[in-house]
Image (tube, rainbow, N blue to C red):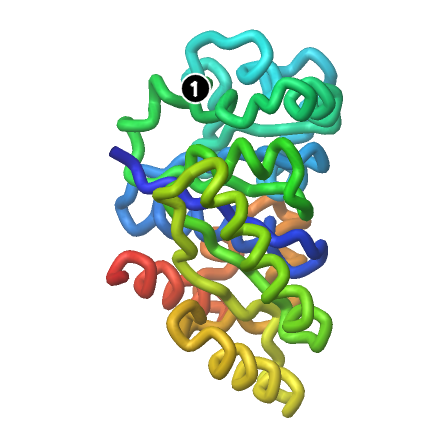
Amino acid sequence: MSKTIAITNQKGGVGKTTLSVNLAAGLNKAGKKTLLVDVDAQGNASASVGLMIESGGKTIKDLMTRGGNPRDFITTVDSLEIIPANNSLKDMEEMLINNKSFDVLKKALAPITNDYNYIVLDCPPSINAFTKNALTMSEYIIIPVDVGYFSILGLKQLLEEIELERKSLNPSLSILGVLACKFDRRTSLSQQVFDTLKESFPEKLFKTTIRLSIDVVRSQIQHKSVFDYNPKSFVAQDFQQLIEEILNA
């Protein structure tokens, strides 16, 4: 059975989609058959690999609403398999909330769950109906945070909220780790924030930090992972270290 990891943070701009895409790509390159699932109506993970799905295209929304063989909804980009999303996903949120339908995603992907070593879910920047669906089917959560003051203020609240969701939706869900992103070694602030995170969450903080790098933006413009864009870059090395940390956990 696959290990399913939800990438989530209710704060936007923390590197959530960057982590989702490069984690999935890195695991895949490490020989672990990996599926990336975009469950964010913004569709940023899909766009990052060059998938701009127009109306009528096959997306995670279509799979969740109409059902069918999930293999028919998978697109392969640079050997990475992904089920994309677009803005139409938001059209079903009210229905999911009203019906408290938080296991739709789990049921939709059930036929292929055992086909992968890892399934990575890129969640919206909020605990909404789609995040709840992702948490219901996931074994683990990774929380990316940027090394800024407000990230620390909101992290404890987020962890408390996730604990409530764990109790109500998925008792087997656990936090794999908190990941410091956009880390800038040139500033003392980044190190101070990281040290504070280490003190506050000693058992949950990844040793790896993802450094601030223009190569992330450049790779997204080229619709590539950092491994495919510039495998020798320091940010690719950071993600490789993270992959090794996860595989050895």
Residue drawn 28% across the image and 57% down it: 247
Comparing 51 with 141, the one in front is 141
- State the residue lying farthest toward the bottom: 188
Give the total number of marks visible in the rendering. 1
In the depicted structure, whether residue 29 falls above or below residue 187: above
Quadrant position of the N terminus in the picture = top left
Q: Which residue is mark 1?
A: 107
Residue drawn 69% across the image and 11% down it: 56
Residue 138 location (% of width, % of height):
42, 39
Comparing 154 with 149, the one in front is 154
Q: Relative to residue 116, is residue 59 drawn left or right? A: right
Residue 233 location (% of width, % of height):
50, 68
Q: Relative to residue 41, is residue 196 drawn left or right? A: left
Q: Residues within 10 Å of mark 1 (few under 14, many from 20)?
A: some
Q: Relative to residue 75, is residue 26 drawn left or right? A: left
Label 1 secondary element: helix
- Give the residue type that dot 1 points to: Lys
In the depicted structure, whether residue 42 falls above or below residue 213: above
Residue drawn 53% across the image and 48% down it: 164
Residue 214 location (% of width, % of height):
66, 67
Q: Quadrant of residue 31?
A: top left
In the depicted structure, whether residue 16 falls above or below residue 66: below
Residue 127 location (% of width, % of height):
64, 43
Residue drawn 35% across the image and 43% down it: 172
Quadrant position of the C terminus in the picture = bottom left
